[in-house]
Amino acid sequence: MSTEASLKTFFSSKYFAVVGASSNTAKFGHKIFAWYIHHSIPAIPINPTASHITVPSSSSSSSSSSSQQIPTIPSLSALANPRETSVSIITPPPVTLRVLQEAKQLGIPAVFLQPGTFDDEVLAYARRGEGDLVESEVDGLGFKSVVAGFGGGTRGGEGWCVLVDGERGLSEVGKL
């Protein structure tokens, strides 16, 4: 599946989650999670060590300096609807591999591996069985779509990233 098609499939999900969400505004786990919230896309933050993620209101939606505190869940296994949830991942490659293994077991349909979250081994594992959702629902072989890597239409020099390519994906599915 082309990355453009994978992007559209990813944003077609009913629900979204962000593994590696953070309240630290300097971290990409915060920037990615805040992107969803500031685009009015409800997303569930996944962080095993924080009870909530604080996201300042975007300047375009509020003139005050208010913020939201959004409760976290500790892992993908705590998702209410994993088979209807696309997942953005912002973790180091060894952690990403474990997250992908859990995601495949749960039948997560689509993943978006942000820059820095994968190496060749992680990317190969993520793409194994891609597009074969019938099998993935049965035995955890693959995702319906994987957004990751370089080339194929991304506008960012660091590879596919929701901060750069997300609005295009939302537009493609009528959510923007």
Image: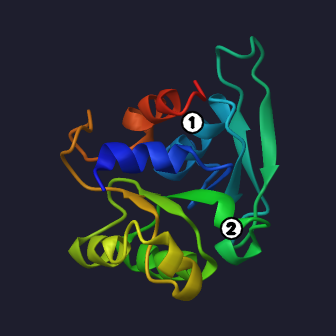
Amino acid type, mark 1: Trp
Residue holding disc 1: 35
Above or below, 98 against 17 in this view is below
Residue holding disc 2: 82
Residue 28 horizontal side relative to residue 126, left or right: right
Measuring from the top left, give residue 46's x and y in whole percent: 66, 63
Measuring from the top left, give residue 169's x and y in whole percent: 46, 35
Q: Quadrant of residue 123?
A: bottom left
Dot 2 alpha-carbon crowd within 10 angstroms: few under 14, some 14 to 19, many 20 or more? many
Dot 1 alpha-carbon crowd within 10 angstroms: few under 14, some 14 to 19, many 20 or more? some
Measuring from the top left, give residue 111's x and y in whole percent: 48, 60
Nearest the viewer among 175 and 71 is 175
Instruction: Name the residue at 50% across, 44% down.
Output: 26
Q: Secondary structure at mark 2?
A: helix
Q: Depth-wise, is mark 2 or mark 1 nearer the camera?
A: 2
Q: Residue furthest front?
A: 134
Instruction: Name the residue at 24% across, 45% down.
Output: 158
Q: Quadrant of residue 124?
A: bottom left
Above or below, 80 against 29 in this view is below
Nearest the viewer among 64 and 81 is 81
Q: Earlier in the sequence, mark 2 or mark 1?
A: 1
Residue 173 horizontal side relative to residue 74, left or right: left
